Image: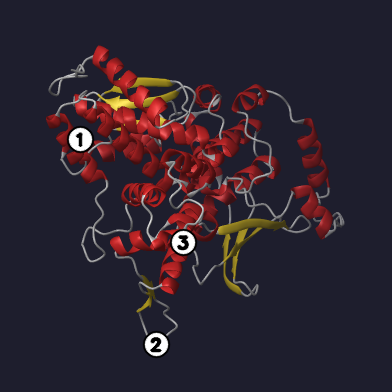
Amino acid sequence: MTERLFEGADWDFHTLQRITDACEEVALKDLGLDVYPNQIEVITAEQMLDAYSSVGMPLFYKHWSFGKHFAYHEASYRKGLMGLAYEIVINSSPCISYLMEENTATMQTLVIAHAAFGHNHFFKNNYLFKQWTDAEGILDYLDFAKNYVMQCEERYGRTEVERTLDAAHALMSHGIDRYPGKKQLDLREEEKRAGRRRQHEEEVFNDLWRTVPKGASKARTAISLERRRKLLGLPQENLLYFLEKSAPRLAPWQRELLRIVRHIAQYFYPQSQTKVMNEGTATYVHYRIMTKLHQQGRISDGNFLEFLGSHTNVVFQPEFDDPRFSGFNPYALGFAMMQDIERIVTNPQDEDREWFPDIAGKGDVMGVLRDVWANYRDESFIGQFLSPKLMRHLRMFHLHDDPEERAGIRVDAIHDERGFRRVRRELARQHDVGYIDANIEVVDVDLAGDRRLILHHRVIKGSQLNETDAKRVLQHLADLWTYDVALIEVDANDKVLREYVVSPRPIAAAVA
């Protein structure tokens, strides 16, 4: 008889090692996964709350907003209004998985299978993570960032550092390079370069601002729009990059803080595009590993039932008319699609052969899934692999709601071939960052006048910015730029819909 990995709910570190070895055996031999080396750490509930507050990065630098989030989550947890994640995993090499010490042995097995092998494989093999992240260098870079922020606080004062970080965090989602083709991020090289002067960039910077008039008594220096845009690298969608390179009054240490924040934002960029796939992969992997361990007799029937209870809760999807419905649960949708691909590969119907001729009946489930995990993101994954059978099972439909139409809300797609394609296309679009994220670019600077920074927001399907939020974020942008900032919202025909103009705050007012 195969020896059990554990009995009951209790565990110790020797048990965790046996669990990890058993999961690794199934992951590598049966599923053919390719993972980074694993580092597993056990933390308390308070440490888990601390990790929550710092964007899931326990090694992050300190900031007041993290403390605010910690206090909020701690109060909610103590009152029983929220639970805690069973684990947090960092996309690094080694891949670090933080496990809650309160977990039972069954739950530790589940989260090791989920994080240390499911997420780990996805991090290492998906093309977006290969393209945008540096798993070898992130831990050293986080340590550098933490120490650098502390040094800045000691030298320039905590208030000044927090003011710069506040503004950088407000612009974090607009501090990202969204398109491939740029040099892959090397965080270790970035750390080495932190103390070096950027001679070429300074020459460009000085050449640009040399053309600015020094006072009203002097004639304005003419500079062509084309040359001005070329010197500034416009149009530029990466606002933090633009400020780091071109803001006229930022100190070198402030530019380095902006660089740190945008590198961290860039590191998280692939995760925002792969939520369904990443969680679906990890959930499918943990389900396969736990099922195999139960079949081998390495976990008992009781422990397996405990696992199934937790797994069922994770993949629960409320109906559209359920008060708890708030969209599709990425765990539920991702896991359902992985299982559906398995069905199509092993036991296809005629409909599947028509819709998925390349994989229907292929037989190699893990080969197909590993290829999918490596080469797709949420938008393309849903757009290519969501099947009519699964759409019927999840009772999907598409509603059309246009306030300019008198007809009001109507069902725009039902369960027929045309409707399936419409539903799939619309659901995929909801996961396309190019469609759901605001398209904001720096387009010009009035160098010959008041040095106003001009941005455009390209409005898609009438989705304009929230006025209050737009003004707050623009205020942070103006504080870093130190001159007026104008944001113009335009439609597809370049018609101006709305314009915001914000002036920088005096230092004392900004700090207060």
Q: Secondary structure at mark 1?
A: helix
Does residue 472 appear in this view? no
Q: Secondary structure at mark 2?
A: loop
Q: Secondary structure at mark 3?
A: helix
Which residue position holds label 3? 355
> Horizontal and vertical percent for residue 465?
49, 63
Q: How many marks?
A: 3
Quadrant location of the C terminus in the rendered image: top left
Which residue position holds label 2? 406
- Give the camera-side residue of 432 and 342: 342
Which mark is first along the chain, 1 or 3?
A: 1
> Horizontal and vertical percent for residue 426?
45, 65
Q: Nearer the viewer, mark 3 or mark 1?
A: 3
Q: Amino acid at mark 2?
A: Arg
Q: In this image, 40 relative to 490: left or right?
A: left
Q: Residues within 10 Å of mark 2 (few under 14, many from 20)?
A: few
Quadrant location of the N terminus in the rendered image: top left
- Give the camera-side residue of 505 and 270: 270
Q: Nearer the viewer, mark 2 or mark 3?
A: 3
Q: In this image, 39 relative to 140: left or right?
A: left
Q: Residues within 10 Å of mark 1 (few under 14, many from 20)?
A: some
Identify the residue at horizontal 56%, vertical 67% (top origin). 459
Per the rendering, the mark at residue 25 is none
In this rendering, is residue 289 above or below 423?
above
Whole-number angstrom distance, CA of label 2 to CA of label 1? 50 Å
Per the rendering, the mark at residue 307 is 1
Identify the residue at horizontal 48%, vertical 48% (top origin). 273
Q: Amino acid at mark 3?
A: Trp
Q: Amino acid at mark 1?
A: Phe
Q: Are marks 2 and 1 in contact (CB under 8 Å)?
A: no
- Give the camera-side residue of 166 and 497: 497
Whole-number angstrom distance, CA of label 3 to CA of label 1? 34 Å
